Image (cartoon, helix red, strand yellow):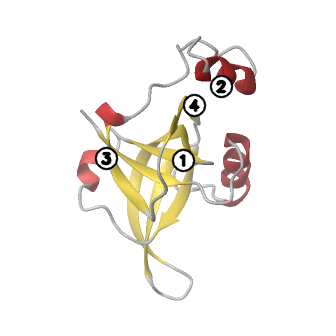
Amino acid sequence: MSLNIIRLCVGCESIEDLRDWQETHNEAPDYPGCVFTMTTMYPKRAEEIIGQGSLYWVIKGKIAVRQPIVAINRTLGPEGEQRTRLVLKAEWIETVPTPTRPFQGWRYFDSEKAPPDLGGAGGADMPPEMAAELRSLGLL
């Protein structure tokens, strides 16, 4: 059972917004095929996450997508403050949209609570809006 992280994706309206932002602003050149996100706190349970867990992104109040976590590094911010860089695969795996309450920062997220990936779920080949509507009606 892997341990994950869940985090709000502030300022993004969609998965495409997140992907575009990361590809244009947050490429991780020291990790080919990866992007990163910065946070303040370093996870005390990092060993349980690196290479096994994912970062689950909450977009507009719903868990919408996850990215596998490759590395977690301590670094310095622009003013010399301690920061944490979460290195993520440049792979955006859509999940079944799952509502969640707002929170600050990031949280540990057990795999048993994580929504399933959309890859094999019904609706993968249809427009996201249509799949969401059918899911809300209990048809997918």
In the rendered view, would you say 133 is above or below 123?
Answer: below
| Residue 107, x across and y down, in percent | 36, 55
47 to the left or right of 102: left
- Which residue of the protein is positioned furthest toward the front in this rendering? 137
Q: Looking at the image, is mark 2 or mark 4 nearer the viewer?
A: 2
Question: Contact (CB < 8 A) between labels 3 and 1?
Answer: no
Q: Looking at the image, is mark 4 or mark 1 nearer the viewer?
A: 1
Q: Label 2 vs label 4: CA separation? A: 12 Å
Q: Label 3 vs label 4: CA separation? A: 19 Å
Q: Which mark is residue 132?
A: 2
Q: Is residue 32 visible?
A: no
Q: What amino acid does circle 1 point to?
A: Val
Tag 4: Cα neighbours inside 10 Å, few (<14), some, or many (≥20)? many
Q: Secondary structure at mark 3?
A: helix
Q: Secondary structure at mark 2?
A: helix
Mark 3 vs 2, N-terminal side = 3
| Residue 120, x across and y down, in percent | 52, 13
Mark 3 vs 4, N-terminal side = 3
Mark 2 vs 1, N-terminal side = 1
Q: Label 2 vs label 1: CA separation? A: 16 Å
Q: Which residue is mark 4?
A: 94
Tag 1: Cα neighbours inside 10 Å, few (<14), some, or many (≥20)? many
Tag 3: Cα neighbours inside 10 Å, few (<14), some, or many (≥20)? many
Q: Label 3 vs label 1: CA separation? A: 18 Å
Q: What amino acid does circle 2 point to?
A: Ala
Q: Which residue is mark 3?
A: 49
Q: Label 4 vs label 1: CA separation? A: 11 Å
- Name which residue lies at 59% across and 20% down: 135
Q: Which mark is residue 58?
A: 1
